[in-house]
Image (cartoon, rainbow, N blue to C red):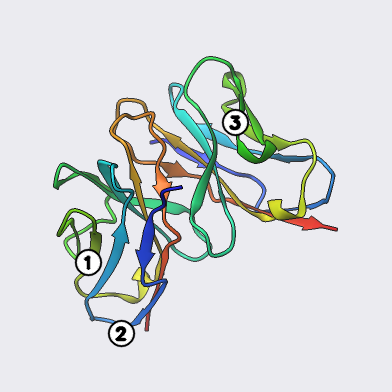
Amino acid sequence: AQSVTQPDIHITVSEGASLELRCNYSYGATPYLFWYVQSPGQGLQLLLKYFSGDTLVQGIKGFEAEFKRSQSSFNLRKPSVHWSDAAEYFCALKIKAAGNKLTFGGGTRVLVKP
Amino acid sequence: EPEVTQTPSHQVTQMGQEVILRCVPISNHLYFYWYRQILGQKVEFLVSFYNNEISEKSEIFDDQFSVERPDGSNFTLKIRSTKLEDSAMYFCASSGLAATYEQYFGPGTRLTVT
């Protein structure tokens, strides 16, 4: 069965510094991949998605992610973090042609220091 | 911007009681979902619903759970006889038809079973 691992439970970063959140997946083929963000009291908001093609995808709020097939990874990056980026971030996958359910990682909580 | 709404935001119930969690998906969406997140654990898929029937369900979604779209706007999750382990955040989501369509999530209902 497919799975998603986010190795970092918490990350603290200074405002203006760069951020990278790790995501690894386990599946025999290339799935659809997603990053969601959850701010306190809010639902899950899609940051970006990878289906095929260019392995570097751009998303909202200045985020990007790179798909690396050889490493089964889909890491999320932002060059300069803002205080409003403090939130929980979830990586998720969906199996192509196998329904629409999302399989989520455990999430990474990001704290931004002033 | 269209959004998924959920009511109530917090529900407290006693073990053995029935609860109904309500969701209003985005109006032109065709797929509806329920996910849950037990505190400290991953977001887990429960069920997807399309064309007035369940299209996929997880092993968590046993006979004590049911879903319904009672009218053209609401989508509900019923838990017939709640257990302590049903305490979780329940997220509703909706999407268009294609597998590449984004799932839009609501803010969640926190269910506490005492």
Query: Alpha carbon of mark 3 to alpha carbon of mark 2: how far?
Result: 42 Å
- Please determine whether, in this image, residue B99 is positioned above or below residue A13: above
Location of mark 1 (residue):
B78
State the residue in front, A27 or B10. B10
**Discs 1 and 3 carry the same chain letter:** no
Q: Describe residue B48's horizontal placement relative to residue A80 as left or right.
A: left
For image coordinates 33% across by 48% down, the residue present is: B26
Amino acid at the residue labelled 2:
Gln
Q: Chain of mark 3?
A: A
Location of mark 3 (residue):
A74
For image coordinates 83% across by 50% down, the residue present is: A15
- Please determine whether, in this image, residue B88 is positioned above or below residue B16: above
For image coordinates 24% across by 59% down, the residue present is: B74
Location of mark 2 (residue):
B14
State the residue in front, A3 or A66. A66
Quarter assignment of residue A77: top right
Q: Describe residue B7's horizontal placement relative to residue B17 as left or right.
A: right
